[in-house]
Image (tube, grey):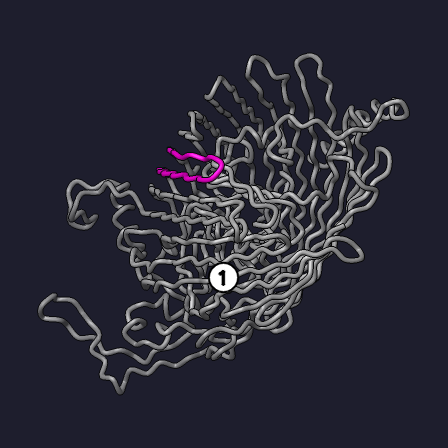
């Protein structure tokens, strides 16, 4: 494989660099790597510090309170970030209404080449409980991470390859917790070193039975004739069958309406839900990591290996066909082994300040299991390399030139696999620069990528949709971004950014072809899809001083050829939906603020609040009353808009709702506590044949007590979520009709650090 050869050569280059400074190891005093940029105690990578995207860091006690089994649930309190909510085990972050192939998931700056971007029911093999910190990039981050970050990126930093020598020969942390309506989780981490060497190890185990929920697992709409009779897609999501309705003509409107007598309004539930429990919401997860490296004042080199395995169910849904009328649960088995190598050196000559080289190789195996057999199996072998070359700072300028390449082989198995086998290669070159002058910081970047898809023709299934016409494709993308921040007296600041971004269609959008039971849809890709282009503008204002902080950000992203999964109006075993393109606008607002009161007679207090909203809608240019059947003149573009409006409506489906929330945190001596609530508004801006969703409020509380005891520093904690036991069905979830969020839960545990 081309990339494996490149990987081997790069590994030799890193080894050569390592040997160059190893010769002086005896006389060189090992030191911590000097970072280019310092934020508190953190040392972000040079390139990451140059991003123009809005950057949020979750770490420390805030991360401890937020940790959850999925990455999406962990980040759900960040303004502009919501959880895709494919059950408690699988949840990707949605950034400003975008997820899947538009939000890159990274581990220590390198992509996680897993199947979660292909289908939301596949869990990403990234464990928040093992993270040191999580970096969230909101808005296009494509200059640094390619088109898969056109909507943003999330980077989980876990220290698996040590980049600094430890201050102690041995240190670590451990945590064990469990309780009512929650999982049992145990994790441990060890870090150590001697001389110029450092090592790292961690392990995690999680086990959860089916969650308790308030009321039934099925939504009331699944039992309502009026809600179901004219909505075939809702009938499929609810997995119900209706008696033949009686249609009558309404003389006032001239339309056909339901006139079925009450005694004939019979709903046959093909997969009855449960009361008080969420079927198929259990999970078992294991993960372990080993890493180590050598660090001197001249550079560093290290490697790590991680194995992750998780077995869980898809809540609510079941496998039902005419040939298989009895419902069978859908289970997922996700497994990944990942290898990382990272090295760097600091030539500080010829204008080069530092060179960082990262390599990643992963093998993943995702299985959708029905009746004990793999219905669909996705096997992915991926190799990535990234080289960052930072130039010597000059008159306020600092920057990096980078090269990135990846190779991925997706092999699919199963008689009804909804994807063929596809090989993908990507090559990218990027540049990012920053200049600081007094209170003004300017950033900019440019990136060019080449993406090539090669489909295995022998694995293309025959079918009646466009997915059966799959062919090889190649794309070239160019991304550009600029931003400015001006820091004023008294902690005031103003920000602005502009992005011109492009994304190649993803593998699922090009080549899907068949019944995808994880989302109860016959999914059809289209290998004729063009590049998706986005023009983004963002403005921000705020202030931050010792006591008060407030920020307001507004953004608008206009997409050309936005790729979406559209209705076809056809239903076979499942409703047929096709990947299509059309112009779309996404705009929103994010507000957050805090007030800190330290040194009061009752302790320290922090009051924080936030609110966000996002609206995603097609951009139509066709005249009012236009019809391809009666208007003159007609155009192909207006025809496409006409069918999009009539089949899909005036909004994108599963659009996240507006939210607002507040949190009061208190600490005094060894004690700390917090109480918070987030209100999710009702959603009535819906796509075609999409029912509105109801509002709900989630209340949580946390209490912790720190104490010294044999072994190190201990902390006992108590966390409670959904204290009011409210039924919550996120509008942006595929599982809204079948699987609400978990009910009231209480977790107790112990943390140890030494």
Where residue 417 appears, as percent x and y from the top left, is 56, 60
Q: Is 273 left or right of 224, judged from the image as shown?
A: right
Q: Of residues 739 and 206, which is closer to you in this image?
A: 206
Q: Of residues 288 and 451, which is closer to you in this image?
A: 288
Point 75% across, 30% down: residue: 32
Can I make out residue 148 in this image? no
Q: Of residues 132 and 713, which is closer to you in this image?
A: 713
Q: In which quarter of the image is residue 351?
A: top right
Q: Which residue lies furthest to the bottom in this view?
A: 263
Where residue 656 appears, as percent x and y from the top left, is 39, 53
Report if residue 385 lies within the magenta region.
Answer: no
Point 76% across, 43% down: residue: 304
Q: Is 262 left or right of 289, judged from the image as shown?
A: left
Residue for badge 1: 700
Point 34% across, 68% down: residue: 232
Can I make out residue 710 in this image? yes
Please determine whether, in this image, residue 648 is positioned above or below residue 424: below
Q: Of residues 664 and 229, which is closer to you in this image?
A: 664
Where residue 290 appears, as percent x and y from the top left, is 78, 48
Report helix, strand or loop for mark 1.
strand
Report if residue 550 lies within the magenta region.
Answer: yes
Where residue 293 appears, as percent x and y from the top left, is 80, 37
Residue numbers of the magenta segment:
539-558
Q: Is 394 left or right of 348, judged from the image as shown?
A: left
Please rate how many residues cluster around mark 1, counting C-alpha atoms within 10 Å: few if below 14, some from 14 to 19, many from 20.
some
Please determine whether, in this image, residue 291 is positioned above or below residue 740: above
């Amino acid at each position: 494989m081309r990339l494996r050869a490149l990987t081997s050569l790069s590994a030799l280059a890193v080894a050569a660099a390592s040997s160059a400074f190893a010769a002086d190891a005896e006389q060189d005093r090992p030191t911590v790597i000097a970072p280019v940029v310092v934020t508190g105690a953190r040392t972000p990578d040079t390139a990451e510090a140059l991003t123009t995207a809005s950057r949020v860091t979750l770490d420390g006690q805030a991360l401890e309170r937020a940790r959850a089994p999925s990455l999406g649930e962990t980040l759900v309190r960040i303004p502009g970030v919501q959880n895709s909510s494919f059950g408690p085990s699988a949840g990707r972050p949605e950034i400003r209404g975008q997820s899947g192939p538009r939000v890159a998931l990274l581990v220590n700056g390198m992509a996680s080449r897993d199947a979660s971007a292909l289908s939301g029911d596949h869990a990403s093999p990234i464990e928040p409980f093992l993270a040191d910190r999580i970096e969230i990039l909101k808005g296009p981050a494509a200059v640094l991470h390619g088109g898969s970050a056109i909507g943003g990126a999330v980077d989980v930093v876990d220290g698996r390859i040590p980049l600094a020598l430890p201050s102690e020969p041995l240190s670590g942390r451990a945590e064990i917790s469990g309780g009512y309506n929650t999982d049992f989780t145990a994790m441990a981490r060890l870090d150590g070193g001697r001389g110029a060497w450092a090592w790292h190890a961690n392990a995690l185990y999680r086990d959860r039975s089916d969650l308790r929920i308030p009321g039934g697992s099925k939504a009331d709409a699944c039992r309502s004739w009026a809600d179901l009779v004219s909505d075939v897609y809702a009938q499929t999501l609810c997995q119900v069958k209706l008696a033949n309705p009686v249609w009558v003509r309404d003389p006032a409107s001239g339309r056909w309406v339901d006139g079925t007598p009450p005694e004939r309004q019979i709903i046959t539930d093909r997969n009855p839900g449960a009361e008080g429990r969420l079927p198929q919401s259990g999970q078992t997860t294991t993960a372990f990591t080993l890493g180590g490296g050598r660090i001197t004042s001249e550079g560093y080199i290290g490697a790590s290996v991680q194995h992750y395995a998780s077995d869980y169910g898809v809540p609510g849904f079941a496998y039902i066909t005419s040939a298989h009328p009895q419902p069978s649960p859908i289970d997922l088995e996700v497994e990944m082994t990942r290898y990382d190598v990272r090295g760097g050196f600091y030539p500080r000559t010829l204008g080069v300040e530092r060179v960082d080289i990262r390599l990643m190789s992963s093998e993943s195996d995702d299985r959708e299991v029905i009746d004990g057999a793999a219905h669909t199996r996705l096997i992915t072998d991926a190799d990535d390399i990234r080289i960052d070359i930072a130039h010597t700072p000059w008159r306020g300028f600092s920057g990096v030139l980078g090269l990135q390449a990846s190779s991925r082989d997706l092999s699919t198995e199963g008689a009804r696999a909804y994807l063929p086998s596809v090989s993908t290669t990507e090559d990218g070159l990027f540049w990012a620069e920053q200049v600081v002058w007094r209170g003004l910081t300017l950033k900019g970047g440019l990136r060019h990528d080449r993406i090539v898809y090669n489909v295995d023709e022998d694995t293309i299934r025959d079918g009646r949709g466009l997915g059966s016409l799959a062919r090889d494709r190649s794309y070239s993308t160019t991304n550009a971004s600029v931003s400015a921040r001006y820091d004023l007296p008294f902690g005031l600041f103003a920000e602005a950014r502009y992005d011109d971004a492009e994304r190649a269609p993803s593998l699922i959008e090009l080549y899907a072809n068949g019944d995808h039971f994880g989302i109860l849809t016959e999914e059809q890709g289209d290998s004729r899809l063009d590049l998706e282009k986005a023009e983004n503008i963002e403005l921000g204002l705020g202030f931050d001083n010792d006591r008060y902080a407030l920020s307001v950000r507004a953004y608008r992203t206009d997409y050309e050829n936005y790729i979406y999964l559209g209705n076809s109006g056809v239903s076979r075993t499942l409703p047929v939906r096709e990947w299509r393109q059309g112009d779309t606008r996404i705009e929103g607002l994010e507000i957050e603020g805090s007030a800190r009161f330290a040194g009061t007679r009752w302790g320290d207090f922090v009051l924080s609040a936030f609110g966000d909203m996002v609206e995603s809608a097609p951009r139509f240019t066709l005249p009012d009353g236009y019809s391809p059947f009666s208007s003159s003149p007609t155009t192909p573009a207006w025809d496409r808009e006409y069918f999009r409006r009539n089949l899909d409506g005036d909004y994108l489906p599963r659009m996240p709702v507006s939210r607002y929330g507040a949190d009061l945190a208190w600490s005094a001596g060894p004690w700390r506590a917090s109480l918070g609530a987030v209100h999710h508004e009702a959603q009535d801006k819906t796509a075609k044949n999409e029912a509105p969703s109801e509002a709900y409020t989630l209340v949580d509380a946390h209490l912790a007590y720190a104490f010294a005891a044999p072994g190190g520093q201990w902390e006992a904690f108590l966390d409670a979520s959904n204290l009011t036991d409210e039924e919550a069905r996120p509008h942006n979830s595929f599982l809204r009709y079948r699987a609400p969020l978990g009910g009231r839960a209480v977790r107790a545990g112990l943390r140890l650090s030494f």
